Image (tube, rainbow, N blue to C red):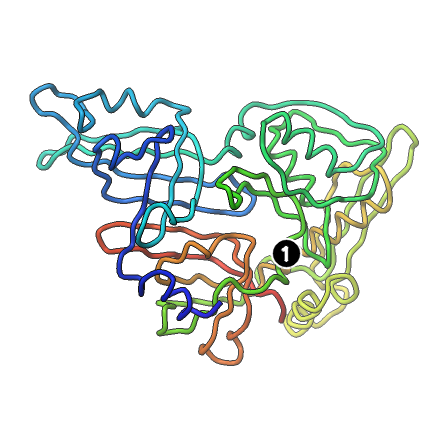
Amino acid sequence: MELVTLSRNYGEFFAPSFVVRLANRELVRDLQVAVSQVEVDMVLGAAWHFSFTVIDAFDHKLRKFRTGQGDDLLGQFAFGASIEVCMGYGDASSMPTVVNGVITEVSTSFPETGAPELVVSGYDPGFLMTLGKSSDSWRDTTDSDVVQQIARFHNLNTAIDDTREKRPQIEQNQESDWDFLKKLAARNNSDNEHFELYVDVDGRGRSTLHFGKPRVKSDPVVHLSWGEGLLSFRPQANLAGQVAKVEVYGSDTARKEIFIGRADAQSDGGARAKSVAQHLGSLVRAPGKQPVLRLRQPVFTQAEADQRAKAALSERTREFLTADAETVGLPELRPDRTVQIDKIGDAFSKVYYIEKATHRIDASGYRTRFHVRETTL
């Protein structure tokens, strides 16, 4: 979508606004609580974090934080209380939900001058999957079926891509559900891109666990040009940490078999890995000296070892060309989406994949910062 179209939809970006709901009650309208700033951090592979600052709520006579109706405010911000954050422009009823979550932290300070403030923060429902550690095992099933079972246990809606391959054995060994699902995501790949894991809100504002192919080939959610909505863009191409080959070593002790999975940047990694390999070749000219990443991982078939090697290679090469950017506040800029960047020269004007995004509204207005990587070289 062109920025001019979004500009018309959002009233020329003149009236940035937000709504914070505590257990379905709006802080500002229903509880008459003043909020000075709101921020949401979105990162692939992690629970999304929100925070907001409450001001002018401390009653100096009673020495308490109170709502506009005089109720105890700290009692309202109980740990685990549900929070919905909406950000955008204009009317609250049409404002998109940015994150649903639960309160995990409340902090304050009593300064030498000025009034105390409350900072309330928390995470989306993915955070609950990071708590505790479990052990379990599954036989003759697919990774996607296991993900579905765990999501159902946590009462989450799902958007899961079928992994198809039946594994003879899947092991969760003293790790949190979130770390376990990240491990499953890392060993599944499509078009040399490993699966992504995150929780987002769907069109109805419901929290949904995503486990599947990254949407690197999706249409850009917006076209941005430097000086026209795109406030800054800082690209970086970096060979540090890149490798020419990956080898994954594993074994099946029950059947006394050893598996070695291999992935070569020239033949297994796609256009991006080939480009990285060429750059490495110019840096390290001796073929036998090319950097190799060797990993020991629990694998039970040769196909799984090869797949993990390709996934590890993809994870390295996708960090070759990255960039950090800032723009006017755009709720559409979220992880697992693409954005078109223009008017910054032939080398950098292209489609990028969003891995991180931070949305912030404060006295200076609404801004979105985001981290991207290239989708093709």
Residue in the foreground of this view, choosing between 64 and 72: 72
Q: Report the side of 12 relative to 309 (left or right).
A: left
Q: In the rendered view, would you say 42 is above or below 371? A: above
Residue in the foreground of this view, choosing between 245 and 180: 180
Which residue is pictured at 46% across the width and 70% down the height? 2
Residue in the foreground of this view, choosing between 147 and 274: 147
Residue neighbourhood size for the residue with mark 1, other residues' Cα within 10 Å, grouped as few (<14), some (14–19), many (≥20): some
Which residue is pictured at 86% across the width and 41% down the height? 301
Q: Residue 33 at what x, y percent from top left? A: 22, 33
Which residue is tagged 1?
316
When asked about the image quadrant of residue 105, the answer is: top left
Q: In the rendered view, would you say 343 is above or below 239? A: below
Q: Residue 211 at what x, y percent from top left? A: 64, 43
When asked about the image quadrant of residue 58, the answer is: top left
Q: Report the side of 59 relative to 264 (left or right).
A: left
Residue in the foreground of this view, choosing between 62 and 268: 62
Q: In the rendered view, would you say 15 is above or below 148? A: below
Amino acid found under the numbered disc labelled 1? Arg
Which residue is pictured at 29% across the width and 54% down the height? 16
Q: Quadrant of the C terminus?
A: bottom right
Secondary structure at numbered mark 1? helix
Q: In the rendered view, would you say 3 is above or below 143? A: below
How many labels sit on residues? 1
Q: Residue 59 at what x, y percent from top left? A: 12, 25
Q: Residue 295 at what x, y percent from top left? A: 72, 45
Which residue is pictured at 10% across the width and 37% down the height? 114
Q: Report the side of 262 relative to 209 (left or right).
A: right
